[in-house]
Image (cartoon, rainbow, N blue to C red):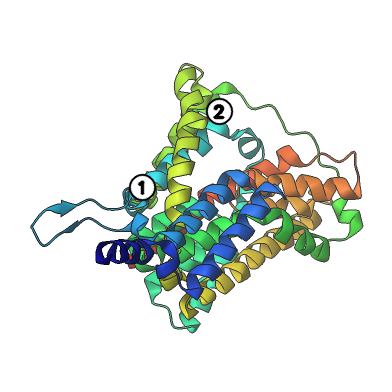
């Protein structure tokens, strides 16, 4: 009888019901909410589903993120599965491979055809610096403030890369906030864009972009890599992989590498990065005042970045005599190609015959480079 009672007691104590807390329940509800948005509302499911499921797993079974340890007998106890996935985040491996895939699947032609897009991409980075000073005012250290501010660029991989070097203790909340706002680009940006532009401005049709030669396409990633890495060597892992992926695409001689980088490898890395990032959101680590500050600062940064891009677009519109649609300025944040699609969508609402997607891709690609450069500046100063 005692054996039976002990067995039942051990089973109860080993169950998840015995160890779960109300904070875990809150995080489980949040995870289910994110899964709902991803599946039902189709809000970037490739990002949200692995992140939300990682969040669900770690709050049901915290041991899935446990580090390796030594038991009383001196034997090695392996760590949890997602701990080993997370090592790729800590060392900046997954973010760099994501950039490789982004480069392989992205057409840099619109940026080459319209170099002024670099200015719109740079303007949209204003949110990063606004968030940095806001974080300093809230008491974060320089490194932590820099890591938080990158959320304003709507660039999850760069946020993870910078946080892993300057504030690893905040990597989880920063990564979740960055990817959450990336997923919510179609919700957050349109109201800001409509508020800051007139209907007449939204209806502006832009001239067709000039054709870009193959030589220009091949030289662009090589020249950008040389210039940016010489100025900011710390950007090499991100900018280098982004440009290598694009060189795969534009060279035309490594079709297999292009397909693997932009498809199979990209999706595998998204699974590893997404689930491991989600698994950093244990109730104890996530439900605290610092996390709420990070989430709030991230939203402020993202709003400022979108607004500054649109406002600079309005300035360029006036200087060009009404030839530039200010909506493309909002694509200066790094969410490729989501932000460019939002510019197209809002423009088409004003005039269904307006086609802004390719024009918006210029600032969008410039934003990716701009965010990586901003991260390099912070690494050079605080690293």
Residue 117 pos. (x, y %): 65, 47
Q: Nearer the viewer, residue 90 or 141?
A: 90
Choose between 14 and 25: the one closer to the eye: 14
Q: Position of residue 94 (x, y in %)?
A: 40, 45
Q: Position of residue 342 (x, y in %)?
A: 74, 49
Q: Please, is residue 35 above or below residue 251 in the view? A: below
Q: Is residue 2 above or below residue 238?
A: below
Q: Secondary structure at mark 1?
A: helix
- Judged left or right of residue 59, residue 329 is right
Q: Alpha-carbon neighbours of circle 2 within 10 Å: few (<14), some, or many (≥20)?
A: few
Q: Which mark is residue 216?
A: 2
Q: Residue furthest left?
A: 74
Q: Residues within 10 Å of mark 1 (few under 14, many from 20)?
A: many
Residue 47: image location, x then y, percent: 56, 48
- Is residue 372 visible in the rendered image? The answer is no
Query: Which residue position is annotated with label 1?
Result: 85
300 or 4: nearer the eye?
4
Number of dots carrying numbers: 2
Front in this rendered view, residue 61 or 287: 61
């Amino acid at each position: 009888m005692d054996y039976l009672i002990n067995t039942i007691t051990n089973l109860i104590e080993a169950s998840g019901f015995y160890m779960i807390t109300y904070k875990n329940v809150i995080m489980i509800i949040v995870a289910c909410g994110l899964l709902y948005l991803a599946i039902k509302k189709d809000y970037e499911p490739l990002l949200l589903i692995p992140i939300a499921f990682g969040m669900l797993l770690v709050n049901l079974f915290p041991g899935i993120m446990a580090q390796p340890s030594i038991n009383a007998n001196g034997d090695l106890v392996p760590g949890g599965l997602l701990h080993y996935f997370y090592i790729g985040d800590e060392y900046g491996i997954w973010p760099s491979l994501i950039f490789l895939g982004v480069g392989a699947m992205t057409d840099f032609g619109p940026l080459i055809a319209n170099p002024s897009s670099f200015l719109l991409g740079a303007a949209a980075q204003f949110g990063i610096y606004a968030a940095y000073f806001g974080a300093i005012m809230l008491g974060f250290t320089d490194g932590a403030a820099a890591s938080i501010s990158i959320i304003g660029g709507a660039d999850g991989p760069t946020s993870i890369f910078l946080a892993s070097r300057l504030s690893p203790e905040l990597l989880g909340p920063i990564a979740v906030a960055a990817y959450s706002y990336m997923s919510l680009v179609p919700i957050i940006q349109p109201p800001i864009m409509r508020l800051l532009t007139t209907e007449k401005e939204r209806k502006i049709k832009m001239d067709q972009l000039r054709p870009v030669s193959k030589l220009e396409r091949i030289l662009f990633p090589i020249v950008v890599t040389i210039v940016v890495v010489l100025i900011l060597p710390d950007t090499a892992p991100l900018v280098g992989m982004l440009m290598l992926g694009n060189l795969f695409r534009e060279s035309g001689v490594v079709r297999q590498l292009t397909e693997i980088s932009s498809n199979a490898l990209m999706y595998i890395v998204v699974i590893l990065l997404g689930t491991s990032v989600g698994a950093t959101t244990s109730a104890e680590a996530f439900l605290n005042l610092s996390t709420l500050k990070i989430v709030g600062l991230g939203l402020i940064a993202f709003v400022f970045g979108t607004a500054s891009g649109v406002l600079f677009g309005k300035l360029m519109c006036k200087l060009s005599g009404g030839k530039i649609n200010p909506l493309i300025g909002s694509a200066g944040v790094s969410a490729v190609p989501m932000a460019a699609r939002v510019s197209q969508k809002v423009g088409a609402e004003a005039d269904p015959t307006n086609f802004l997607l390719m024009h918006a891709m210029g600032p969008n690609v410039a934003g990716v480079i701009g965010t990586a450069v901003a991260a390099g500046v912070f690494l050079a100063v605080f690293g």
